[in-house]
Image: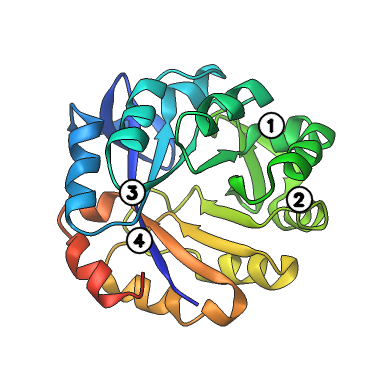
Amino acid sequence: MSFTIFPAIDMRNGQCVRLEQGDFNKQTVYGDNPFEVAKGFAEAGATWIHMVDLDGAKEGSKQNAEHVVKVAQQLDVKVQIGGGIRSEDDIEYYLSRGVDRVIIGSLAVRDLALTKQLLGKYGKRIVIGLDARDGYVATEGWLEKSEVQAVDLGKELASAGAKTFVYTDIAKDGMLQGPNTSEIVRLAEQTGVDVIASGGIKGIEDLQELKKYQQYNVIGSIVGKALYTDRIQLSDALNEEVR
């Protein structure tokens, strides 16, 4: 089993940004051209790129889709996109334009029946984003906290055919304090589904620690702020980890 590094590109107003704990008021801009950032990641050897439409997550509709499609169609990388995907039309839009996987989060909480139908139709091309605050799933760009526990939702969607989860501990995201490894592993163990870790990666040692849990279906990690602040060099991470 390989462990995949997913360099992250979070987009707001067409720029590459990072937020702290999902707070739109705590934003740092790291670039004005998502395509050029993605190109750099591809040239460093990335096989996947994780893209997030922050405006879309907040507004509930696609806002930065043109950047995602350009990366998917013009670079030799696989792309997964989350943020603002609230309908089957949104899913079709991306998948028909070269995007490999779409991530749905708020929709999974708001319309579980539809989510199950979509999993049945699109299978592994749909990833479920479980973004948790104190163990409960947050929605609408992390602005709303639901009454649904991440592990419970994970179990239900695993039984409905979900193949991959992205688990983010919001309190860790953008803070460079290390991932919530115990919850990541708990989700993987209790659902039996592949889990991609997200939030808090601060150095190569975090990736090495997560990689120890491949046998429990922890298959990779999203890396964002640590790349933009040069705490991790992508080429080093890719060489250290098995892609």
Q: Which residue is mark 4?
A: 201
Between discs 1 and 3, the one toward the N terminus:
3
Residue type at tag 1: Leu
N-term mark: 4 or 3:
3
Q: Dot 1 lies on which element? A: helix
Which of the 4 image quarters holds residue 86? top right
Distance in Å between CA atoms under marks 3 and 2: 30 Å
Task: Answer above or below: position of 54 versus 160.
Answer: above
Q: Label 1 vs label 4: CA separation? A: 26 Å
Residue 202 vs residue 121, the one in the foreground: 121
User: Within the image, what quadrant is residue 109 found in?
Assistant: top right
In the drawing, what numbered circle is on residue 77?
3
Q: Is residue 48 above or below residue 32?
A: below
Give the side of residue 213 with respect to residue 33, left or right. right
Task: Please tell me whether residue 22 is drawn above or below residue 205 in the rendered image.
Answer: above
Q: Which residue is mark 1?
A: 107
Residue sitting at x 67%, y 64%: 193
Tag 2: amino acid: Leu
Mark 1 vs 4: CB contact within 8 A = no
Q: Nearer the viewer, mark 3 or mark 2?
A: 3
- Chain-order first, disc 2 or disc 1: 1
Residues under numbered marks 4 and 3 in contact, where contact means CB atoms less than 8 Å apart: no
Query: Which residue is painted at 61% across and 77% down in the image?
Result: 216
* Distance between the alpha carbons at the discs numbered 1 and 3: 26 Å
Q: Residues within 10 Å of mark 1 (few under 14, many from 20)?
A: many
Q: Amino acid at mark 4?
A: Ile
Precedes in sequence: disc 3 or disc 2: 3
State which mark lies toward you, 1 or 3: 3
**SS category of the residue bearing label 3:** loop
Q: Which residue is mark 2?
A: 153
